[in-house]
Amino acid sequence: MIWRILVTIFQIVLLISLPFIVLIRGAIWIHKEYHALPWLAILFGTLIMTIVLLIYFTYVYGRVTGKAGNKGWLKRRAKLAFLIAIAYVGQSALFLSAKNAKSSEVKREFRNLHPILRMSISTFLLLDRSLIVTDGNREPEDYRRMGLPSKSHSLHYPQSSGYAHAVDVRTNGKAAWKNTLMKSYFWLMGFNTLRHGGTGDHLHISLYSHDTPRSI
């Protein structure tokens, strides 16, 4: 009985999370394998998300009406799925609440991050609204100002994509299970993760860069 309940819960969680998983994993895959332009990678992920939503809508429509519907209904469901996907991607990739940024400067720098990173951070906020972005875009002098050795290659620096490929999020003062959940989420989505100190206990999250493939 308990096993069946756990399986049911897993299935529900998977169904809810699948559109977001294919959105982010799809964007990361085409970014890494084909060096896709940032917003082209986002569009690819959006189209995959649209297909998943269309399947969901068609299934629900069939369960309610007992039929799949004609071509006109299919087109309308496809348009609705695409509009929902576009609206979500636009909101998640462009906006970060002030309460989720360490400072107003960090909030302003949010758009300097690669759109895939931005979208992934906003998606994690659906799981944990307490996430705090502590650092994103940097320049060599920023390390010296913080009393740290300046790095010649850092994914916090703008890459050839035009965006920084790394972001730091706060871990100190949070429950261990929340930090584990956060690290697991970004790792499963396809990002590199590294927890370290530096200017404070934080989780360093980075997106693969074709400029310096071995950098984290």
Image (cartoon, grey):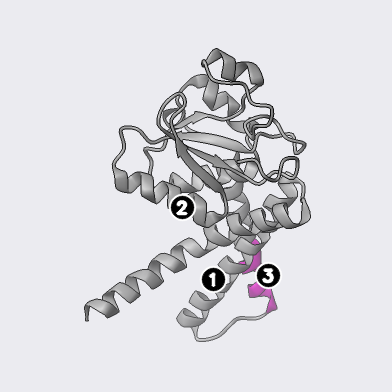
Res 57 quadrant in image: bottom right
Q: Is residue 31 magenta?
A: no
Name the residue type under label 3.
Answer: Lys
Q: Which residues are magenta?
A: 71-79
Mark 3 / mark 1, whichever is N-terminal: 1
Using the image, determine if residue 130 lies above or below residue 63. Answer: above
Q: CA distance from mark 3 to mark 1?
A: 12 Å
Q: Which mark is residue 75?
A: 3
Judge whether residue 17 can be spotted in this image: yes
Q: In the visual, does 155 lie left or right of 100?
A: right
Residue farthest along the bottom direction in this orientation: 66
- What's the residue type where badge 1 is placed? Phe
The amino acid on which the numbered mark 2 sits, given as a three-letter code, is Tyr
The residue that disc 1 covers is 57
Residue 216, percent across and down? 60, 41
Image spot of residue 13 (x, y percent)? 40, 65
**How many labels sit on residues?**
3
Q: Which residue is mark 2?
A: 185
Residue 158: x and y in percent read 70, 31
Q: For the point 68% across and 74% down, which residue is it?
A: 72
Q: Quadrant of residue 81?
A: bottom right
Q: Is residue 76 magenta?
A: yes
